[in-house]
């Protein structure tokens, strides 16, 4: 901008000197010097009375603003006297055309206006914006305002621009930008279009809190001094004054005073970069070291967090195992108490049934003699002949049932007894399986109609605990039953001996839903279960795997989804004692 001002000032000065001889000559012959603006009389400077921060009347009615200070500075360096006349902008344009003012100190440039006035080089640029009441959707351009009621500064550059765009209807005119914004705040129009800085200044000073800019930078125009067409002398003096102010730094001082806070100061990049380098290079080094240290610390924290998380997971699993163990211990106590309570009445049954059988045998002889003498009669609602056949069988079934109750209760007592796992004795795997199946017989009958058992006799014994082996069998059989989708699916339990590995094995095969391949490696993980919704805890197979491993054996799974599952438990056979 500085180059434009200097170049234009030189051209204007040349024109002034070229025409100055004629002017001076005319003055010597016939024209008094007091008729020339700035020489014989003050220059009448026109401007807008309400266009802050560029030009306005302050609270004391005195001219103020960026344009006013700039004009005073030009007058001082050029040795001119000036007189300000600020009023409605449209009236000031008319006053310039009629010669009542000599120069307008702030006018936006346009090709249309060049037909009426001449411009000095621009001393600034003005951005225009669209203002609306808060809550109004934003607009992208002036074209988006068609069909809306628009308030305009009469005679301003936006008035000329919108008129050229063909906006004829729904335009509301005001003498000043402040009046246009007041009309908008009062709801008398939809939008107001005016310069950005004056708009923001007016909103702030007049507390128009319901108004805001909804489109910024819809037009950017050059802004400078304007004289009536042909007044080259005055134009040259103001252009030269602008160039001088620019060179002395006075122009920048005035601009920063009025526009710097609102526009932002001009940046001198070399000085700024030099200053920033002195500040930011040490900061960048410090920041780099801080980032490296932070990264290292973060990695250490993440590692510690992972370790802590693993420890917490292990602690949680141990807590759950303790809870489960406590439940099992409580169940053992409960089973022992229930078994004792069942054994008492069952013992009476077993004690009394043999006596009843003897009494029935003696009674039959008497009843036979009675039947020979009296003929047929009923006993307990049935003919005597039928009752004589049924009664011995009923007593025999009662005795067998009581014996079965006794065996189940004894098995429960053995299963519920606390096993420290330290003492090991030879155990017949088939006998342990048989005991376990008696305990879960109700579950088996409820789950399937196709349950088969193949227990090989005379198996080599295994060293371990019958109770713990029974626990493994119970877990495997219950899992198999739970995997069946219907009662028509089968479950098979078998035992046998593998001479190649000298081990005894148990297989539990079911025709259930099977297990997905990705879940097979996790089956013995603590708390892993695919039956959470059915109440599964994920501890059965984990505990079973632990027992089998403790006995020196192996637990293997073979399964395909939809094709069932085969679980094989292999336990090493106990060493045979040498024959004496």
Image (cartoon, rainbow, N blue to C red):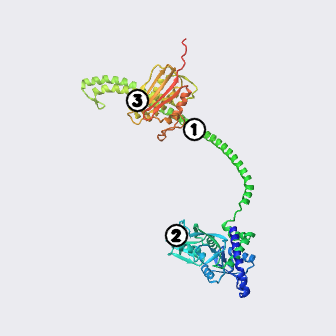
Bin the neighbour count of mark 2 within 10 Å (Cα to Cα): few under 14, some 14-19, many 20 and up. Answer: some
Judging by the rendered image, the residue that carries numbered circle 3 is 451
- C-alpha separation, residue under disc 3 versus residue under disc 1: 35 Å
Label pair 1/2, CB-CB below 8 angstroms: no
Labelled pair 3, 2 in contact (Cβ < 8 Å): no
Front-lying residue, 202 or 393: 202
- Near mark 1 (Cα within 10 A), the count class, few <14, some 14-19 or many ≥20, is some
As rendered, which of 461 and 467 lies closer to the eye? 461
Q: Residue at x 39, y 30 (%)?
A: 450
Under circle 2, the secondary element is helix
- Which corner quadrant of the image does residue 49 belong to? bottom right
Pointer 2 residue: 145
Q: Which mark is residue 81?
A: none
Rendering coords of residue 342 (x, y %): 46, 32
Which residue does the numbered mark 1 point to in the structure image?
317
Asked whether residue 413 is in view, the answer is: no
Q: Residue 428: x and y, percent?
A: 49, 22
Local secondary structure at mark 1: helix
Q: Quadrant of the C terminus?
A: top right
| First along the sequence among labels 1 and 2 | 2
What is the spatial separation of the Cα atoms under label 1 and label 2, in whole angstroms? 69 Å
């Amino acid at each position: 901008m500085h180059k434009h001002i200097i170049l234009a000032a030189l051209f204007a000065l040349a024109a002034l000197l070229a025409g100055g001889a004629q002017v001076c000559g005319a003055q010597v012959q016939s024209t008094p010097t007091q008729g020339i603006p700035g020489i014989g009389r003050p220059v009448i400077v026109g401007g807008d009375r309400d266009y802050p921060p560029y030009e306005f009347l302050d609270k004391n009615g005195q001219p103020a603003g960026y344009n006013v200070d700039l004009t005073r500075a030009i007058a001082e360096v050029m040795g001119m006297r000036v007189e300000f006349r600020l009023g409605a902008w449209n009236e000031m344009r008319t006053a310039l055309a009629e010669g009542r003012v000599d120069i307008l100190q702030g006018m936006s440039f346009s090709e249309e206006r060049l037909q009426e006035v001449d411009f000095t080089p621009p001393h600034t640029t003005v951005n225009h914006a669209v203002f609306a009441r808060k809550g109004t959707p934003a607009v992208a351009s002036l074209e988006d305002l068609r069909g809306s009621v628009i308030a305009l500064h009469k005679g301003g550059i936006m008035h000329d621009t919108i008129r050229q765009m063909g906006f004829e209807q729904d335009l509301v005119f005001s003498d000043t930008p402040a009046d246009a914004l007041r009309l908008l705040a009062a709801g008398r129009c939809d939008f107001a279009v005016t310069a950005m800085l004056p708009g923001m200044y007016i909103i702030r000073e007049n507390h128009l809190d319901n108004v805001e800019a909804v489109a910024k930078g819809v037009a950017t125009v050059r802004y400078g001094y304007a004289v009536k067409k042909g007044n080259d002398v005055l134009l040259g003096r103001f252009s030269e004054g602008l160039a001088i102010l620019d060179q002395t730094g006075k122009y920048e001082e005035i601009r920063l005073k009025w526009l710097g806070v609102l526009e932002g100061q001009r940046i001198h990049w070399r000085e700024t970069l030099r200053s920033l380098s002195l500040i930011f290079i040490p900061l960048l080094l410090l920041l780099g070291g801080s980032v490296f240290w932070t990264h290292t610390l973060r990695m250490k924290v993440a590692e510690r967090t992972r370790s802590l998380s693993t420890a917490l997971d292990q602690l949680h699993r141990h807590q759950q195992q303790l809870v489960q163990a406590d439940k099992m211990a409580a169940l053992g106590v409960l089973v022992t108490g229930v078994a004792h309570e069942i054994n008492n009445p069952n013992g009476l049954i077993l004690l009394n049934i043999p006596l009843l059988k003897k009494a029935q045998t003696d009674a039959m002889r008497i009843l036979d003699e009675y039947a020979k003498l009296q003929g047929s009669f009923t006993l307990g609602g049935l003919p005597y002949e039928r009752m004589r056949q049924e009664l011995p069988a009923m007593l025999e079934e009662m005795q067998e049932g009581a014996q079965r109750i006794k065996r189940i209760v004894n098995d429960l007592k053995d299963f519920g007894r606390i096993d420290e796992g330290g003492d090991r004795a030879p155990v017949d795997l088939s006998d342990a399986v048989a005991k376990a199946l008696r305990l879960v017989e109700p579950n088996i009958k409820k789950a399937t109609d196709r349950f088969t058992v193949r227990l090989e006799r005379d198996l080599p014994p295994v060293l371990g605990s019958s109770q713990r082996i029974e626990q493994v069998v119970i877990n495997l059989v219950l899992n198999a039953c739970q995997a069946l989708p219907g009662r028509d699916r089968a479950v098979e339990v078998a035992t046998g001996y593998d001479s190649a590995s000298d081990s005894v094995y148990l297989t539990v095969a079911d025709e259930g839903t099977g297990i997905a391949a990705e879940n097979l490696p996790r089956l013995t993980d603590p708390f892993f279960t695919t039956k959470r919704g059915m109440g599964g805890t994920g501890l059965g197979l984990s505990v079973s795997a632990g027992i089998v491993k403790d006995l020196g054996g192996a637990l293997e799974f073979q399964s395909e989804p939809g094709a069932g599952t085969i679980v094989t438990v292999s336990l090493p056979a106990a060493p045979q004692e040498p024959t004496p």
